[in-house]
Every structure is written in structure tokens, then in C-alpha cells.
């Protein structure tokens, strides 16, 4: 007998960045973060989990290539935690099939290149945990699932929800209060769109896991960011989202991306995630934002924001009405941004999750 479930999970792109751990094993962050979950139509991970008494061990295939589960503490964290919860259920209800004792076959597929900074681990671990929770019929809330996904990859805990999602850092040593929650559903702000510009799909040099560790150990700017900057930004960002205040949303998003990359530069030895094309996109967006002036205030009208994760690819957030012009500008200035132009751009819209 085979039990099988298939789920998909979305990608999220942070507007206030998670960078730094206070506990590496449990993946507890040094600061809270906030992200937008993108619609699953364009970017998602699809994961199928099968349990059968004939499977003698757990096996996992990522984009059709088998990976060694034993080599990954993070995969083991998620599988062990959910299996343990299933075993507890089985001990209470003997009529349940003994899935916790069977081997698992896990097959996970991204519908996008596992490229630099495209958050494949976030959607990957979110899909894995929700698939296991469903297969094992665990009575877990999304918040509980986000805690387990967090032990796979920090940013994955935010992909358990759609729309605008905050990950509270928490204070407890066991991570019991470090989970994500929805600030607002995607339907709250349907006019906000995201454009992903793939500058390079080469695998990044320094992984976020090791990069953030070196930042915690060596950057002098970093403690100031965690203590004096991020807490205020979290509050201001939540307010901006609830008020659909694009100007504040955009300004904080750009400043937070810049400060995160400044911390990378302040890491010793420094980490460079942005390249010349990334920096040109930053200048392009500032030039775009300076184009229109509000006659009442005399100030520029902010109509787009950029943000960059641990790689050179840009994500541009903008109101739907500005997207056509932005796509034209980006494709005009960067006609062949990567080796495979067919994968250059993904235009994305928030969707229901
Ligand atoms: C720059 O979640 O990939 O994308 O917890 O070690 O797996 P681990 O790190 P990861 O880091 C993501 C960092 C970031 C910012 C963000 O998504 O908030």
C-alpha cells in the first residue's frame, strides 16, 4: 500500500532582510524580517511525498537528481520532526497506518532555475514540510508548520503563508516563538506587482548560510542594523502595507536591501553579491523615480523599488500601472542580461495562496 500527497509552495522575496543567526542549529535569526509571497503561477516548488512499507529507507530527488538525505542536517530536521509527531498520533490511535515506521520517497521539482538568489530553498522546505504534514495528517497550524520549515531554511518559514508575511525573531532559546505570520493577504494590495530580473543564473559564490555567519562574526555595522534599524523598519513597513502606502513601502525596501549589502561589504573578508548589472538596475530605478515630480510637493513620485538577495538578481516591486514602462526600460538597457535570454524575466503578480 502506498500513501502519497503532492503540494506546491511559493517563493517569497524579503523587503526587510533576514541576515544572521543567533542559533545555527535551530535557525533562529538575529532580527525579524518581512517578505511578499509571490503568486505560484510563475515560481513554485512542487513536492510529492510517498510512504510505503516496501521502502526500506528515505530517499529524495531534487529536480530529478537524487540527493543524500543523511548529508543534510536541515532535511533531517524537517523529516524527523514531522515523523515524530506522526508517531505520537499513531501511539494514541492504533487504527492509523504506521506511516512513521515506513520509508519515504520525496520528489521535489522547481519550475524555475535553481539560480542565484531565487529563493529555491524557501519554497523547497516550505513544500517539504507542508507535504509531510499533509501525508502524516498532522493537526498543525500554519504557524506550527512555519517553525518546522524554519529548521530547514530560515526564509522558508515565510513561504508557509501567502501575501505579506513577517517572521518574528523571537526570544526563547528553543525557538518556540520564532515563526512567521501573515500581515495581510495578497488580495489586500492587488495593485502591487513584482518583476524578477535574472541578471545571472550562475550559482552564487558565497551561500547565504555561510555568508551571514561571517557577517555576524566580523561586521561592526551589523549589530547597529539589528538593534537600531530593523525594529523600527518592521513597524513602519507593516503600517505602509496596511495603508497601501507605496512610497514608504518602496523607500524602506530599497534602503533595507542597500543596508543588507552594506553589511556584506562590511563583512571581513567582504562578500559581494551585487555585480555591475545589479548596480546599473539600482541607478535605473532611482532615475525612473526621479522622472515624475508631484506638482503639489515638488518631490519625486516613487513608482518602483528594487531589492536584491544573496545574489545579483533584482526584484522590482511597483504598482501595476508602472510595470509596462519598467519592463520596456529594463529590456532596453539590458537586452541580453544572461547567457540564456529566454529566462531573462519573470513578471509576477501577487496571487491568492
Ligand atoms: C538574503 O534562508 O537562505 O535571502 O536560514 O541559512 O537557509 P538559511 O538562509 P536563507 O537566507 C536568506 C537570506 C536572504 C534574505 C531573506 O530572504 O530574508
Image (tube, grey):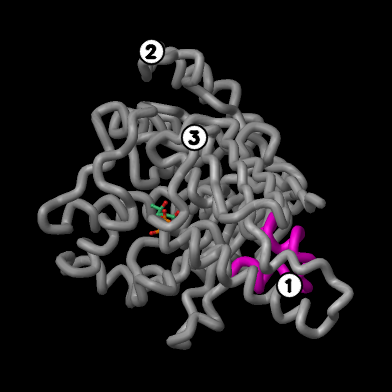
Tag 1 or tag 3, which sits nearer the N-term?
A: 3
Residue pictured at 37% horizontal, 19% vertical? 338
Q: Is residue 325 magenta?
A: no
Q: Which residue is mark 3?
A: 65
Nearest to the observer: residue 308 or residue 66: 66
Distance (Cα) linking label 3 and label 2: 30 Å
Residue beneath the point at 30% across and 68% down? 225
Disc with the residue nearer the chain's start (2 vs 1): 1
> In the picture, residue 31 is in which quadrant?
bottom left
Secondary structure under the numbered disc 2 in the rendered image: loop
The disc at residue 336 is 2
- Badge 2: how crowded within 10 Å, few (<14), some, or many (20+)? few
- The answer to which quarter of the image holds residue 281 is top left
Q: Viewer-nearest of labels 2 and 1?
A: 1
Q: Mark 3 Cα within 10 Å, few/some/many (few <14, many 20+)?
A: few
Residue 140 visible? The answer is: yes
Is residue 11 rendered to the left or right of residue 155? right
Query: Nearest the camera: 40 or 349?
Result: 40
Residue in the picture at 79% in, 53% down: 3
Observer-nearest of 235 and 156 = 156
Gap in angstroms between the C-alphas marked 2 and 1: 46 Å
Q: Is residue 101 left or right of residue 197?
A: right
Expressed as whole percent of the image width and height from the top left, the position of residue 189 reads 71, 49
Choose mark 3 or mark 1, whichever is in front: 3
**SS at mark 3 in the image:** strand
State the residue position of label 1: 140
Q: Which residues are magenta?
A: 130-147
Amino acid at each position: 500500500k502506498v500513501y502519497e500527497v503532492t503540494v506546491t509552495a511559493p517563493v517569497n522575496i524579503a523587503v526587510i532582510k533576514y541576515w544572521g543567526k543567533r542559533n545555527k542549529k535551530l535557525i533562529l535569526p538575529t532580527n525579524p524580517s518581512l517578505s511578499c509571497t509571490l503568486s505560484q503561477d510563475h515560481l513554485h516548488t512542487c513536492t510529492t511525498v510517498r510512504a510505503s512499507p516496501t521502502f526500506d529507507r528515505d530517499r529524495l530527488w531534487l529536480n530529478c537528481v537524487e540527493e543524500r538525505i543523511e548529508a543534510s542536517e536541515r532535511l533531517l530536521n524537517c523529516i524527523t520532526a514531522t515523523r515524530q509527531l506522526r508517531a505520537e498520533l499513531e501511539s494514541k490511535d492504533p487504527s492509523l497506518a504506521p506511516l512513521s515506521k515506513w520509508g519515504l520517497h520525496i520528489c521535489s521539482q522547481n519550475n524555475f532555475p535553481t539560480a542565484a538568489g531565487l529563493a529555491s530553498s524557501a519554497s523547497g522546505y516550505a513544500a517539504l514540510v507542508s507535504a509531510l504534514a499533509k501525508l502524516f495528517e498532522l493537526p498543525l497550524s500554519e504557524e506550527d508548520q512555519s517553525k518546522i520549515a524554519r529548521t530547514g531554511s530560515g526564509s522558508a518559514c515565510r513561504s508557509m503563508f501567502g501575501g505579506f508575511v513577517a517572521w518574528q525573531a523571537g526570544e526563547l532559546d528553543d525557538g518556540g516563538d520564532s515563526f512567521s505570520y501573515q500581515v495581510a493577504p495578497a488580495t489586500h494590495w492587488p495593485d502591487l506587482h513584482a518583476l524578477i530580473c535574472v541578471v545571472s543564473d550562475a550559482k552564487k559564490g558565497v551561500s547565504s548560510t555561510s555568508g551571514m555567519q561571517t557577517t555576524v562574526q566580523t561586521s561592526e555595522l551589523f549589530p547597529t542594523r539589528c538593534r537600531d534599524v530593523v525594529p523600527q523598519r518592521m513597524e513602519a513597513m507593516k503600517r505602509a502595507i496596511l495603508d497601501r502606502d507605496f512610497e514608504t513601502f518602496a523607500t524602506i525596501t530599497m534602503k533595507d536591501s542597500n543596508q543588507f549589502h552594506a553589511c556584506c561589504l562590511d563583512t571581513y573578508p567582504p562578500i559581494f553579491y551585487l555585480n555591475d548589472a545589479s548596480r546599473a538596475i539600482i541607478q535605473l530605478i532611482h532615475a525612473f523615480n526621479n522622472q515624475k515630480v508631484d506638482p503639489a510637493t515638488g518631490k519625486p513620485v516613487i513608482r518602483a523599488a528594487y531589492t536584491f538577495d544573496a545574489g545579483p538578481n533584482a526584484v522590482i516591486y511597483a504598482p501595476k500601472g508602472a510595470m509596462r514602462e519598467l519592463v520596456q526600460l529594463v529590456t532596453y538597457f539590458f537586452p541580453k542580461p544572461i547567457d540564456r535570454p529566454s529566462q531573462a524575466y519573470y513578471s509576477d503578480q501577487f496571487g491568492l495562496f
